[in-house]
Image (cartoon, coloured by chain):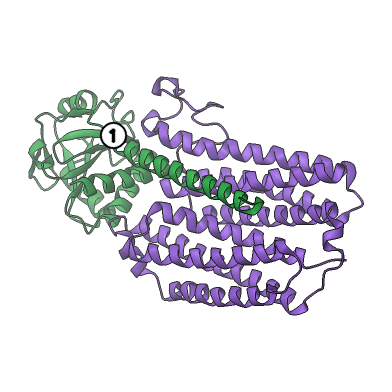
Amino acid sequence: MKRKLFFRSAVTATILSYLLIFVGGLVRVSGSGMGCPDWPKCFGRWIPPTHIDQIPSYIDATSFNIVLAWIEYSNRSLGVLVGLSIIILNVVAIYYFRKELKLFFASILSLILVITNGALGAIVVSSVLNPFIVSLHMILALMLVSALSYICIESYKLIHIEKFKNLEINKILSRSLILFWVLIVVEILLGTGIRTNLELVSIENPLLSKGEQLNVLSSYKYLHSLLGFGLLFFSIYINYHLRDNSLLLAKQLGYFILAMVALQIFLGELMVFFDLPQLTRLFHTWGSSWLVGVIIILYNCMKNE
Amino acid sequence: MNELNKKLLITFLIIFSLGITALFVLREATESKIQNLNVISSVPNFELTNFNGEIFSDSNLNEKITIISFIFTRCEGACPIMSKNFSVLQTRFENSDLVQFVSITVDPEYDSDSILESFYDQYSNNNNWYFLRGDIVDIIELSENVFFLSASLLPGGHSTRFVLVDQKKQIRKFYEGTVDANVMELQNDIVTLINQS
């Protein structure tokens, strides 16, 4: 019972966090980051103004854009919701799982990460969207979903002990998955680097088109594509090792990873050839966050004590 | 339909609807940025002189995107920040001959042509920035009635706002010239105007 409760609160927190990454990405691609010029309030109010008359006199009203304010506000309020869901997760963890040290510490870690990232949100605004800080904000979010994905699979294993009891451990597969995860993180950092630099270029050269901005970047952008194709072959290799696996879930996750890597390459190339369409950027970022979490889940599927 | 297919279908539908929502939100955001640049009013006839003696009138605003500020050279608070921000924008838009900058002194008695010229030398890195002076009465009239900027207790009481004027001499928006976020917003709005033309 309490295990199910813990598992459910972990899944809720994870789904909400993924949704939050999506909304956060939406804030970035739509250029709504300064939709609320103050933090944590929005134009001095807990609920953003719907009319320009509601803006207090000490805030310059000319920068008010109701659409951007509400996009930014949805990111903040969803962030609060994620925070609450993780607090609930921690209450359950502290109450029932003090002895399950891995779960207990992973829960505490997720709480620390979500609070830190919320506070970083304030710096994002006060720095007027410094691209480095915005990227750090996303990287912390990826760490958060990593921790939460870990809690999900570990608590799932507690409920379905029998499924994981007689697993044959494939050492090559486990080690490959660790390497795969590390490479995915490197790939994400490269992608984040490209994006950060694109934004820096665009601030300094506002007249360049997106395609021209991409051309300004040095050749490490090709490394991102190259590693992407490498990861595609790697995920085929992992699926090859999973082919006889007795755990259906593991096989399904393997297919998911392969499909996701292929989709990411497709989206990535689409961006290069079509001047970085906003929706593609959004799903490219979001997809990478799915990969990070799913690999952790798959790896921990393969592991029993 | 088995359990897995059902779950896959639901996941697909959720992601699909997220995509549609995102597309809608992105379109609204783009629209709103253009909406926020609605025409406020038109700039009427005026005439001031640049520090090199050339007349600068409202007709110089035609076919140009102009950013206007009111400053004075002895000012030690806001004006250096405002002028620094003008410099930065000037560099960033140096490849566009559509963009020009205008600073009007609110202290024309002290700010002689030569003082304005040395101020120009200090801040400007292109020849598309005009430092204008004229009769103080005209300048107050211009500030208060044309650009809706307070001009009491001059020179210290001038407004620190920038005014964005489009190619048709229409006032589009105001920005707090000392606040980085607003200057960034101005930069984005200039890009919007350039892309529209």
Residue A258: where, in percent of width, then height? 57, 68
Residue A283 in the image: x percent, y percent?
A: 48, 55
Is the residue marked by circle 1 packed among few (<14), some (14-19), or many (20+) residues within 10 Å? many
**Residue beneath the point at 71% across and 65% down:** A250
Report which residue position mark 1 lands on. Answer: B173
- Relative to the observer, which residue lies in front, A17 or B48? A17
Horizontal relation, residue B74 to residue A126: left or right:
left
Chain shaded green: B
**Residue B154 horizontal side relative to residue B44, left or right:** right
Q: Looking at the image, which is closer to me, B71 or A232? A: A232
Q: Give coordinates of residue B109: x percent, y percent.
A: 20, 34
Q: Position of residue A288 (x, y in %)?
A: 56, 60
Callout 1: SS: strand
What residue sits 80% from the left and 67% below the top? A303
Farthest-out residue, right? A99
Q: Is residue A108 left or right of residue A276?
A: right
What amino acid does circle 1 point to?
Lys
Is A206 above or below relative to B71? below
Q: Quadrant of the C terminus of chain A?
A: bottom right
Q: Residue furthest front?
A: B1
**Compared to A104, does A234 lie above or below?**
below
Chain at tag 1: B
Question: Could you tell me if residue B194 is visible in this image?
Answer: yes
- The answer to whether residue A21 shows anywhere in this view is no
> Which quarter of the figure is the N terminus of chain A placed in?
top right
Q: Which chain is purple?
A: A
What is the tally of numbered marks visible in this picture? Answer: 1
Residue nearest the viewer, comparing A198 with A254 = A254
| Residue toward you, A240 or A44 | A240
